[in-house]
Amino acid sequence: MRLAARVAARATALVCLAALMSAARAQDTDILAPEASNRKAREVIQQSIQAMGGAAYLGVKDATRKGRFSRIQHNGQVTGTIQIVDLLKMPNKERLEYIFRHFYETFLPIPIEAPFHKTGTAYEVHNGDQGWLLGGGGVEELPRDVLEQREEQRRTSFNVVFRERLDDPTLVLRYGGMDVLDLKTVDWIEISDGGRYTALLAIDRATHLPLRTVYRSRDPKTRDIIEEVEHYSNYHAFQGVVTPMQILRDRNGWQNSQLFLEDVKYNTGLSDELFTREGLEAMARGKGKKD
């Protein structure tokens, strides 16, 4: 009888706790007027900026990230791993270098379709609304739909929003309330600007670091909702900038890739030439800069 009473009391307590958490979320989202919701969202964002390095984080002009990228099947098995070098130059330049052995016959986990390059390396470059791919067939333009999708998702990524867009009048920020993710209490922030993507950002209430971004969009052909999720963990500081070293990505509930960073450098003065078609063509001839 005593055991049954304790079990019943515990169950009642859990139900009450769940009700209180639900009520807290409802209070955060339902009562706040748009202006108050925006203000609360910006308060949470400012706390996160400080946690990630404050002035050092906001002062990043370029970044060089090196690590390992893997594709994952629906059964959870890794299909292959390659080295990756990701060069970023603010505000909207990126160059990805995929490094692999040219004699592999198995599936290679390159994020986009790319033929083999004779050196065992493929390059993907984004520069504003332009983009190119250097693979085995020389330099080719990236498809327009790939460029548009990448740009829209980039504009709602938390690094771009935090560093560049907080004064953008087209940006809409809403506070989405509290929640519990992986046994951590988080604040949700909704980010939108009228584009294809709406982003939901979960920020840890204890550390103020981003834990998850949920990108939601609608398939232009089927009109089905597409949900892509990025999970951030294993934060380390480099030059005063607190950086997630592990990024896992899901699509519609299935984990499909993982990135494990091994080294990060900021503000090394990356050349603009690295992010041009001419630079890629020079590399194809064996005369261009690698970094």
Image (spheres, rainbow, N blue to C red):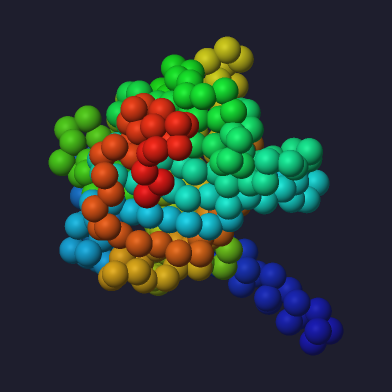
Image quadrant in which the N terminus is located: bottom right
* Residue at image point 69% right, 70% down: 11
Image-quadrant location for residue 122: top right
Observer able to see residue 267: yes
Percent across and percent down for residue 154 are: 38, 37
Q: Nearer the viewer, residue 32 or 12?
A: 32
Above/below status of 84 relative to 287: below
- As drawn, is 144 to the left or to the right of 11? left
* Residue at image point 43% right, 56% down: 65
Above/below status of 262 relative to 70: below
Percent across and percent down for residue 216 are: 49, 33
Most extreme residue toward the top is 221
Observer able to see residue 162: no
Above/below status of 124 relative to 141: below
Most extreme residue toward the right is 1
- As drawn, is 79 to the left or to the right of 244? right
